[in-house]
Amino acid sequence: MDTFIFILEIIGTIAFASSGAMIAIEKKMDIFGVNILGATTAVGGGIMRDVILGVTPPTAFAKPVYILFAALTSTLLFAIVYTTPNILHSKIKNKIYDKIMLWCDTVGLGIFTVLGIQTASRLVTEDNPFFFIFIGVLTGVGGGVVRDIMAGETPYILVREIYASASIAGGIVYIACRNSVGEASGMLLGLCVTVVVRALATHFHWNLLRIH
Amino acid sequence: MDTFIFILEIIGTIAFASSGAMIAIEKKMDIFGVNILGATTAVGGGIMRDVILGVTPPTAFAKPVYILFAALTSTLLFAIVYTTPNILHSKIKNKIYDKIMLWCDTVGLGIFTVLGIQTASRLVTEDNPFFFIFIGVLTGVGGGVVRDIMAGETPYILVREIYASASIAGGIVYIACRNSVGEASGMLLGLCVTVVVRALATHFHWNLLRIH
Amino acid sequence: MDTFIFILEIIGTIAFASSGAMIAIEKKMDIFGVNILGATTAVGGGIMRDVILGVTPPTAFAKPVYILFAALTSTLLFAIVYTTPNILHSKIKNKIYDKIMLWCDTVGLGIFTVLGIQTASRLVTEDNPFFFIFIGVLTGVGGGVVRDIMAGETPYILVREIYASASIAGGIVYIACRNSVGEASGMLLGLCVTVVVRALATHFHWNLLRIH
């Protein structure tokens, strides 16, 4: 189980670090800024979760491995774009780039949502589904909110259709299923629900009500 | 006393949720963004207070009722504006809208200031008026700062004449009076001072020194 | 040792309060906004450090002296610019102003980096250099990040060449030397390294890799 969770954490870290690093690269930040924004995006949600749960020092500070993976990811992306700068400009043509970014952000959202719920369940004995889901959403969206605020953008969570909603849906499925299908399968199921809901919403341009 | 505090909390929650939700509506966010910004504004200051005081998990996460009221308020406001969109445009004519927003923000500021001081006094035995007032101001202004930063605005507290000052004034009056008039009356008195100071300042366009 | 640390804290507080207050003055904020931004910049990094380390309430809230010095500094700067407004406009000519601001920010960065490491070492028994340096950087850059986000600017740490890098360099030197040269000398050494690295980087326009 610990290995399973660690693998999820590393995939989520790489996904979110990529999304932070690419925004920094688009904003013409230097290699250090790219690393900072990548790492902040990757560990931001987890740090908020730990502060809320009273875990001091937060895992991201106590165990260097997450920041290390975030830095490796950010530096690698920087190196790729630095050596082949055309990648960024060709994006207008083929949209592959936007798709990769969307997937990184969506996979990170799904993984950190279930990881947040899992951590909260281990630390808080009282069974409070509302609280668990709230911590899951915070862990899932936290890194992206910090990324967007630092980059001077309106946070995704406020403007993208079906973002926090996808995280909530995944969290509900995980909590509803884990007693019957087991912890690990429940996490995978919740994570898939978040990813599928967000992917469908983006593909079919689902929109929530909005006042024009 | 618990009922009295709970009623204040709910009124403050509704007031701040309204101010956050209306800014989100003005910024054309969808119904979920409106709920997120409403809830963040309503519970943001209290979460900061609890993190500073070491209350884990913060009350807003442990007890769903506050988020629930914030969501109800935000959704209701969204529904009203959605069904009668002219409301927003008529505001230029009659300024009633701006007044209501100002009152929501001011009442929230006053209520959360005294609630912050009250919570800090219960949890910290040492009698440290400076600390209590500081926690009060943080609780009062915290939600609005998060709201403004997420919405991409300069925080009110930095640019509105007599904002944190009104919160400090109310906090001082509450702490100075509570031993003689009792806890509940002291809270009401402090809250009224904050509201009156801010209302007078806005009405008479009081300004603090500024360099042009 | 306590006196030595206290002196460093007060110098760092004054330096960072100046940098926050001057940005507020440039943005035409009123005297209260200037005080808020000055104080937030001065104590922001320390509050983040204390929250991460589980120190509740954070030192800046428990002991009024830091906020008091930040307020005195901010008010004094406001008074100077208010009475001699030409100071701000003459800056275009002589650049002395920009240099002073850079020094304030750099000295604050260096001092709070070593203070953060020192506090973390006292509270956390486990010897984890990575963690200590991370806390040092957070303490050093935290106030400036809050300042820039509240003022609506892109955080320095993301865009200025050699900012967090200077903080990391100073932190490494402090940790590497303190066993041989003693705590106080190690702090001074680390602080000097941060200041010198940043000063050299600015003077010679050192730049980290960036994609154009």
Image (tube, coloured by chain):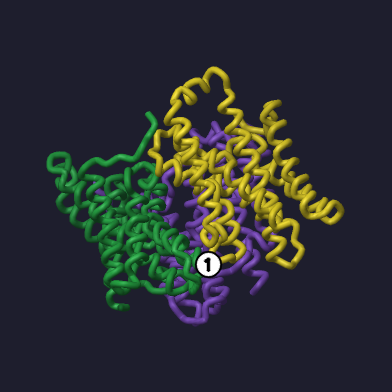
Chain colours: A green, B yellow, C purple
Picture coordinates of residue A87 (x, y %)?
Answer: 15, 48
The N terminus of chain C: image quadrant? bottom right
Picture coordinates of residue A210 (x, y %)?
Answer: 37, 35
Q: Is residue C130 visible?
A: yes
Q: In terms of secondary structure, where does tag 1 sit? A: helix
> Is A192 above or below relative to A62?
above
Q: Amino acid at mark 1?
A: Gly
Picture coordinates of residue C136 (x, y %)?
Answer: 48, 66
> Is A183 above or below relative to B52?
below
Depth check: give the residue in front, B93 or A63.
Answer: B93
Q: Which residue is denoted by mark 1 in the rendering?
A: C116
Q: Is residue C125 left or right of residue A84?
A: right
The C terminus of chain C: image quadrant? top left
Q: Is residue A46 left or right of residue A107?
A: right
Image point (57%, 39%), residue name = B156
Depth check: give the residue in front, B106 or B206.
Answer: B106
How many marks can you see? 1
Considering every residue shown, the one lying at the far top of the view is B93
Image point (48%, 72%), residue name = A124
Depth check: give the residue in front, A58 or A28.
Answer: A58
Picture coordinates of residue B102 (x, y %)?
Answer: 61, 33
Q: Quadrant of residue C85?
A: top right
Q: Residues within 10 Å of mark 1 (few under 14, many from 20)?
A: many
Chain of the residue where label 1 is placed in the rendered structure = C
> Is C168 above or below relative to A105?
below
> Is C9 above or below relative to B116?
below
Considering every residue shown, the one lying at the far right of the view is B180
Q: Is residue C69 visible?
A: no
Q: Is residue C135 left or right of residue A164?
A: right
Image point (41%, 49%), residue name = A150
